[in-house]
Image (cartoon, grey):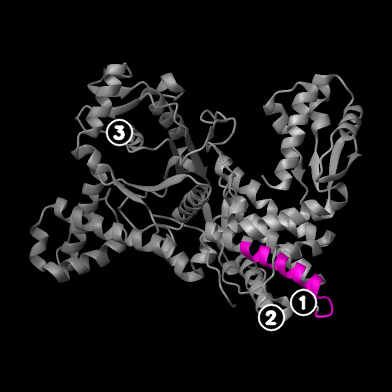
Amino acid sequence: MNPIEQIQKAFSDYLIKTFSIDAKTAQHCTPILNIDEQKQDFGDLNSNAALILNKALKMPPRTLAEQISKEFTHPNVEKIEIAGPGFLNFYLTKECFVALAQQLFEQEESFFKDDARLRLSGPSGSASYDGRLKSDVYPISIEFVSANPTGPLHFGHGRGAIIGDVLGNVLNFLGNKVTKEFYVNDAGRQILKLGESLKARCEQIVGIESPVPEDGYQGEYLLDIARAVIAEHGDGIINKPAEFFATIAKKQLMDQQKETLDKYGIHFDVWFSEKTLHDTGAIEDALNYLQNAGYLYEKDEALWFKSTEFGDDKDRVVKKSTGELTYVAADIAYMRNKIARGAQEMIMILGHDHHSYVTRLMGIAQALGIGHYPFNVILYQLVKIKEDGELVRMSKRAGRIVDLRDVIETVGPDVARFFYLHRKADAQLEFDLDLALKHTEENPVYYVQYAYVRTKSILDRAVEHSELHHIDVEDAIQLNHEEQFLLKKIVCLKELLADVATQHQTHVLTYYVHELAQAFSKYYGKNRVIEMNNIPKSRGRLLLVQLVRSTLDTSFRLLGISRPDRM
């Protein structure tokens, strides 16, 4: 444990022993780092323990706070002061900060990983979270994007893609074994419609009047594929059945989707074909399991899943009267397949319009007897494009859809990733193209990367002086009060990553790197790092710069953005 965690644990143990409270209550009383620059006069750690416990202990919070401040001691705590109705403000010793800096310097990114065990992923309070701990590598399946292979990825897909990718990065970083999955919806009527649409486009190119079916795919992108098909196979290809064209179109569009995601910096471990569930009989096997468990029934010559038994607003058809299997049937088999492949937890990232779908999926898990496996769904809100201060209206009918590839090629993958992640998932996102194209400090991506480049510039200048070579842990003794604030900003990344792993709020990582860059830029603006008339102080400040650079480096890799040497 680092010195902060030692204090937190000692305080929790003290509360449990002194006031006979349970560990969960004590956890809510844990002192947290004060990283509000405007409130540094209120200590380095803050706790509202007295306000939480006063009712149960039948003591005025101020009186309780006074007792705690007198009784609790720790070598890393210089003093405890009481503020307001009973807030506890902990002031840390200089030795504590020195020890923190030394650990950060020696451990580098390992500092931000849990020492031994991680809580299972999943928002606390959710049905799947039970507060258990795990010690070994923990397999987690994260499914995201999963766009139909019937067209290019549109700009809205970029949001779910970055949420899933960064969450997977964080969970992997913390020692889990994450499988990033893309579920390919390549079965059913929609694929045949795709084939019929491409065939119609091919016929148009060779001079045959052949309208695209009304319920087909009208996009111009099929014209490009059709031209390539005719160029390769000749006019006679139009005599092939729609299924032939469906196979070609699916492959071409999937290749395009993979290429777009590659440019976006996203790579999937598994591209799972829905068609394989049909071909292998996995869907029928899953339905037989539910039938034997009593969760299916027949009505109107169709087969229904008793979804209402699990909180859904209505039961769901899994097999139509025609014998055609529904998406729900495939979902049942797919969920079962994930567990069979070793997943001990499932996470799905879906658009906000899948809200009712969540209850259905939870019910499926319960009916399959796998409800004890943590299962979490992250719903993200709409993305709107903003240009010249105005929202750009998008319409499928009008053909005004911005492809994700267009966004990436216009602003670059770094900016695209950062901007898509710069709001909470359940809040609408306005993607400001004008801001994204700026190469000034107004652009948050430019701002944080420039701070990173500045750290390298400072360290490069230090190399010119032999007295500043080989910065080591002993130089941490030089850190003063102002530098201690920046050190706390660095340290808090550890708790933030643990929160991302359990709460799944990936946007906080973009906020963090921006705040760290701001804190560093402000510090740099007020202090000369290299002062040749004060070598010890310069060495201490260079150690701090190295810590900032290392922390930004770790954060950038988790975000999947580049780490430039110059700008």
> Which residue is disc 3 drawn over?
333
Identity, as a three-letter code, of the amino acid under mark 3: Ala
- Residue 516 screen position, x and y as percent: 69, 60
The picture quadrant where one finds residue 280 is top left
Name the mark on residue 461.
2
Q: Residue at point 27% right, 51% down?
A: 216
Q: Is residue 321 magenta?
A: no
The amino acid sitting under disc 1 is Ile
In the image, is 331 to the left or to the right of 76?
left
Q: Which residue is mark 1?
A: 530
Residue mark closest to the camera, 1 vs 3: 1
| Residue 415 pos. (x, y %) | 54, 65
Asked if residue 206 shows in the view, the reply is: no
Taking the spot 31% from the left edge, 17% from the top edge, the residue there is: 293
Q: Is residue 160 left or right of residue 26?
A: left
Give the extent of the magenta segment: 532-550
- Who's the residue at 30% across and 52% down the image? 149
Mark 2 secondary-structure assignment: helix
Nearer to me, 425 or 106: 106
Local packing at callout 3 (Cα closer than 10 Å; few below 14, some 14-19, many 20+) is many
* Residue 492 x/y as whole percent: 69, 50
Q: Are marks 1 and 2 in contact (CB under 8 Å)?
A: yes
